Amino acid sequence: MNVKWLVTAVAGVVLVAGCATKKGFEQPGFAFGCPIGEEKVGSMGDLVRAKTASEGRRTTIQPTELRCSKTGDLLKIDANLNNDSSSVKRIAYKFRWIDREGMRAAEEESWKPLMLYNNSNLMISTVAPSAKAVDFRLVLMSQE
């Protein structure tokens, strides 16, 4: 009988110790694979707000999800844009690349036009132009 209690106690200790460790494989300064620096990001919504900017006319199209990974030395970004309205929306987007010092890491990209149909999602992907680009902002502008 004592052996059963001992095995149960050891299993409980191992289970509790396993649950006490940090979840996930996220590096410090990253959230969902994306660089965040010292910002406090506790959810995907926080990450989207931190990494998205608007220029010109504001748009109702917003990213709902951002995911980042490395392709060799280059930062790769996937962003899911959502149009939850009942009408077609036209927008333009570009990525602004930032280096380690917080300065622009590459020439300004040109605007890329998109048309999102009503109640739809669209995934956009890009890769940093150079290894100097360690951070980014997704810039959106309405075309209506």
Image (cartoon, rainbow, N blue to C red):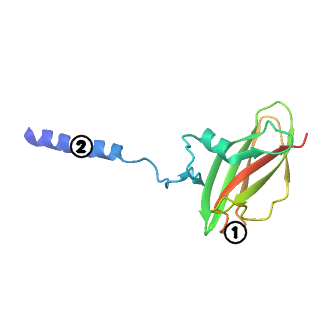
Q: Position of residue 44 (x, y in %)?
A: 60, 41
Numbered circle sitting on residue 54: none
- Toward the right, the furthest residue is 144
Mark 1 or mark 2: which is in front? 1
Q: Position of residue 84 (x, y in %)?
A: 76, 33
Q: Position of residue 60 (x, y in %)?
A: 79, 35
Q: CA distance from mark 1 to mark 2?
A: 48 Å
Q: Quadrant of the N terminus?
A: top left
Q: Against 138, is 12 above or below? A: above
Q: Quadrant of the C terminus?
A: top right
- Toward the left, the furthest residue is 2
Q: Identify residue for label 1.
A: 130
Amino acid type, residue under disc 2 in the picture: Val
Q: Secondary structure at mark 2?
A: helix
> At x 36% / y 47%, what residue is drawn?
21
Q: Residues within 10 Å of mark 1 (few under 14, many from 20)?
A: some
110 or 84: which is nearer to us?
A: 110
Please state if 18 lies on the left or on the right of 141 as rendered. left
**What is the quadrant of residue 9 in the picture?**
top left
Please state if 86 lies on the left or on the right of 35 as rendered. right
> At x 57% / y 40%, what residue is drawn?
43
Q: Position of residue 20 (x, y in %)?
A: 34, 44
Q: Against 85, is 129 above or below? A: below
Please state if 14 lies on the left or on the right of 108 as rendered. left
**What is the quadrant of residue 118 in the picture?**
top right
Q: Identify residue for label 2.
A: 13
Amino acid type, residue under disc 1 in the picture: Ser
> At x 67% / y 64%, what residue is drawn?
133
> At x 78% / y 39%, what residue is drawn?
61
3 or 28: which is nearer to us?
A: 28
Q: Against 53, is 112 above or below? A: below
